[in-house]
Amino acid sequence: MRDLRAALLAIEELRGDLFRLAARVVALEEELVRRVPADERDAVQAALDARTPELVKQIQAADVGASGRLLLGDAVDKYAVPPLADGGPPCLELLPICQARCCTFDVPLGTQDLEEGVLRWDEGAPYLLAHDDAGRCAYQSADHSCTVYAERPAVCRAYDCREDRRVWSDYARRIPAPRDERPADRALTADERHQRAAARGVSLMIESRALRRR
């Protein structure tokens, strides 16, 4: 399993190299066009346009695609995640109503989870927590309780369903959201995208260090 994790990390690192190379090429193109005489710019641009499609094909062949990106959880100690300030929602009381709808959500595992080796991940979407054929968490029991509660991921420990429109239409009145309706994801701000990218970089660094330890 560690060999597979190492291979997946290598693919992800290659993807990052390709993005950096693509950014550098764009910068070089802009600088080249700026420096050439005005009467030659159309010819230069035409040459670039003619060459680009083939280069794009080559890059795409090396790229694993968006669906192949490592969905690695944040680099946090899940056992140090504090409980919700007010104790959180009464999950056991709510289970008959919501039927643990949160257990259908995608949950990325972190390096800590992978190193423990307790939680299985979906080999088709590394490293999302494994789901059964019905789309529910593989560790959810028949009565909707969690069979790996002590080892549950950090995402599960910090989750609060009360304001989640995927779960409740009206939490206070205990009205669950319609199952066939999923609210559209809110578009991230530029700052949020940068924060996620930074967190992802830290997670990949932690994964790399863990795999290189003897």
Image (cartoon, rainbow, N blue to C red):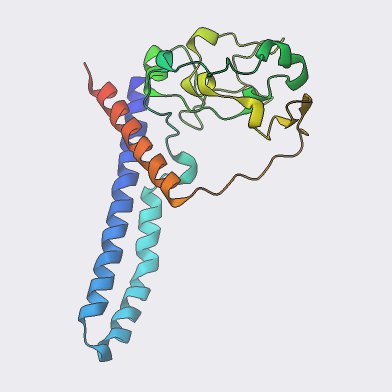
User: Where residue 197 sits in the image (x, y, percent)?
Assistant: 38, 42
Please indicate whether residue 78 sits to the left or right of residue 213 in the image: right
Q: Please indicate, yes or no, whether residue 199 appears anywhere in the rendered image.
A: yes
Q: Residue at x 39, y 51 (%)?
A: 61
Q: Quadrant of the C terminus?
A: top left
Which one is nearer the viewer's eye here, 189 or 100?
189
Q: Is residue 54 placed above or below 165 in the rendered structure?
A: below
User: Where residue 50 sits in the image (x, y, percent)?
Assistant: 36, 75
Q: Residue at x 31, y 36 (%)?
A: 10
Instruction: Point out the residue furthest to the bottom here.
Output: 39
User: Where residue 43 sits in the image (x, y, percent)?
Assistant: 30, 85
Q: Residue at x 48, y 11 (%)?
A: 151
Please indicate whether residue 82 sits to the left or right of residue 50 in the image: right
Residue 112, by quadrant, is top left
Q: Is residue 192 placed above or below 203 in the rendered structure?
A: below
Residue 169, by quadrant, is top right
Q: Quadrant of the N terminus?
A: top left
Q: Is residue 60 placed above or below 53 in the rendered structure?
A: above
Please indicate whether residue 185 sits to the left or right of residue 13 in the image: right
User: Where residue 191 sits in the image (x, y, percent)?
Assistant: 42, 48
